[in-house]
Structure formats: structure tokens, C-alpha cells
Amino acid sequence: MSLTEPAAGAEATSAPTPVRRSSQLRIGWIMPEFVRELPVNSTDTDEVVESLHALATDLLPDHSADDQFRFALGVGAQLEAMEEANVIYAGLCFLEVEGRPTVSTIMASQVEHDGEDEASALRTVQEVLERKHPEDDLQSVELPCGPALARVGGSSFALASEVSPTGQEELVAQSEIQVFVPLPNTAEMLIFELASPSPEGWELHSELFAEILKTIDWCTDQEIEDYRAMSQSTPTAVEPAEGVKQELYWHSSRLMDSVALRGRMGGGDVASLTCAACWAKGLRSACSAQHSWYIGEVSVGDLARALPRVVEWFTSQGWSADGASTGERVSLLAGDEAAQRSAGHSFTVSVNAEAGTFTAEVIAPCTRTSSAANDSLFG
């Protein structure tokens, strides 16, 4: 993920979202494309009107022009308040739950704090929240980007009479999550917020929000220059930890036992690597490791039985085969029913009948992913 500008031709499932530059950092995260961004940063009135009109017609194609106008008016009425709250990103998320439409708003604000460091800033925020929202649930959470504080509770907003279905101003209750994320080595903090008036969709929206929070990342100007210089190169080699190596050897041993081939062993190197998910986000530091080896001088008959034996043995142990596997190549990933020790491990095996070789690549879990909470950040 580029932290400086959107990637051209972003995938349909997600898009990089650039954020305001802090005094020392460039910050970004990945937002699903079905979350519709609101024009909170636009100062051009015509541009705002055009954006709201497109939003209303896209989201309410089967509604009348009056309904679309009231929707755009209601969204537009919130923009000034967002600007006053230092909102740098806002988006509407519509999800269908059991055939019913549900909606949430996702916002990010960037504010200053007067804490001596990130830890003291979070302590101050917690003290303020405990006084202001004594009934709400406060949680310290560890995001891949660092420590944060989450508040899970409720709030309300006033629906103006001109957009209210009753023609009178209404107070609308909603569930809310706020997550406070200090920016390292700065006097700034990001506040991410999820709010939804749809109780039937709250669980799904909060799970999506938790996944978005896990993608927050930042870097310095120097790191950006380093990234530009190495974006077409392989990651800098880093010696994998001894514990990681031992786990890879253990899994390779199980793989050798399952395939039961006779031949000449080769390879055996363990190398650091950046996993595909982190690479797609623009991260280039090593986060995983790979044990590569092969068995040569194997008979054609034994090779023909090798992959089916591997698939049969490992799927019976709770592993799952990649749908892209072919007759000459199979990828397997440890699933929920696999042994806890195998969580996050995967391997790819292939055969080359002409060369008489069986090749294996056994891959360790991504350390960034495994360091994050396995389930929802909000319990």
C-alpha cells in the first residue's frame, strides 16, 4: 500500500486511502471500496454538490428525486460538524444483513495531544473517557501499528426536520466505537470512529471496522524514499529467528513423512521474506520465512502418487488446499481444525516428472498478522 497516493487500478475489494501528512509521518490504511467516501476535505462547493448528488443517485437509484435530495441534504448537513472535529476521512458503509439494509459511518480525525509520549497520551484519554462515559466499555488494544485505546458505547445525533421522515427534528440513537491511536514520536493522535443506528448489523459492521484498524500503517519521509528505491527489488535479507527455523524444520519433516519419497535431497535453505499481504500494502521489511528443499531422482510412478498423498494426509489433519492448485502443484494452509502449532503455516509442493523432482516451499506465519488479535478487537 502506498502511503502517499492512491494506487492506480486498485483491486475491487480494497483501496489505499491516503491521509493528511503529520509533522513527521505519512499515514494510511486500507478501506474497502464499497465504503463510500464523503467529501470532507473538499473546499470547492461545486465539487461537494456534485459528490453528494452522485452519492445519492448511486445509493438510492430506485427512489424519487425528492428522496435523493433529502438524503444528500442530510449528509451535507454533517460535513461542517465533521470539519470542526478535524475529520480527515469519512465514509458510509451499507451492508445487507439477512435481507435487510444496514448502515454505518466510519470516520477518522487527526488531533493534537499534550502527553509526554504515546503511553501518557492514552492514559489521559482514558481518564477523560471514564469521566465522560462511565457506563461505556474501555479497552486497551494492540494494533499492528501499535497500542491504542478503544471505547465501545453509544451516542445520538439530531436528524434535521427537513430530512426527517416525520418532518420534525428527531434524536437518533446509535452504537459507537472510538479508537484512539497515538502517532509515534509526535504530539498527534488519530481517532477512528464507527457509528451505526442499525442494531441488527452492528456485529458485522464492527468486525469490518476491526479489520480496517489492523491495516493502519505509517512511515517517515526517509522510509518513503527507501521504499521508492527498493520497490522493484527483493526485501533486505534478515536472518530468521531460531524458533521460526525450528518450526519450519518440524513442518518440513511432517511433509517428508507424508510424501514418503526416495531420492536425493537438496536445498534446505531458510530465507526471510515479505508475505504477499504485507507486500500489497507497501510494506517491504521481512515478516515471514521460507524453508525450500527438493527431492531429486524420483521415479515417474512415485511422483504421480506424491501430491495425492500429501493432500490426503494434510486435509485429514485440518489443512485446506488452495483452489488454484493443479495436477503438478498444490498449496495447503493450516485451517482452524489443524494443530495449534501449525496455525498460520502453509506450504506449496510441486512435481516435475521430466526432471524427476519433488519441490517444497514451507512458509512460516506472518509475524505482523500473528501479533494482532485473532478475533475482533472489541471482544
Image (cartoon, rainbow, N blue to C red):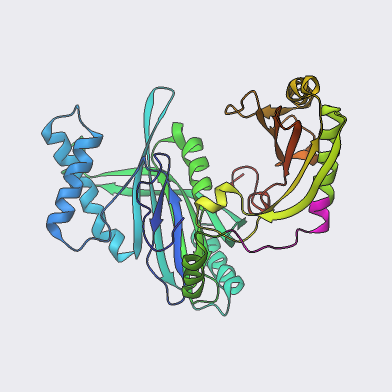
Q: Position of residue 260 (x, y in %)?
A: 86, 27
Q: Is residue 377 left or right of residue 362?
A: left
Front position in the image: 31 or 157: 31
Q: Position of residue 286 (x, y in %)?
A: 65, 58
| Residue 39: quarter of image | bottom left
At x 51%, y 36%, the residue is 203
Q: Is residue 106 visible?
A: yes
Q: Is residue 149 above or below residue 184?
A: above
237 falls in the magenta region = yes
At x 32%, y 49%, the residue is 157
Q: Is residue 228 above or below residue 61?
A: below
Front position in the image: 191 or 133: 191
Q: Position of residue 35 (x, y in %)?
A: 36, 43
| Residue 124: quarter of image | bottom right
Q: Is residue 136 visible?
A: no
At x 65%, y 55%, the residue is 287
Front position in the image: 269 or 276: 269
Q: Position of residue 276 (x, y in %)?
A: 57, 47
At x 51%, y 60%, the residue is 217
181 falls in the magenta region = no
Quarter of the figure that contains the C terminus: top right
Q: Is residue 36 left or right of residue 284?
A: left
Figure label count: 0
- Main secondary structure found in the magenta portion: loop
Question: Which residues lie in the magenta part?
Answer: 234-245
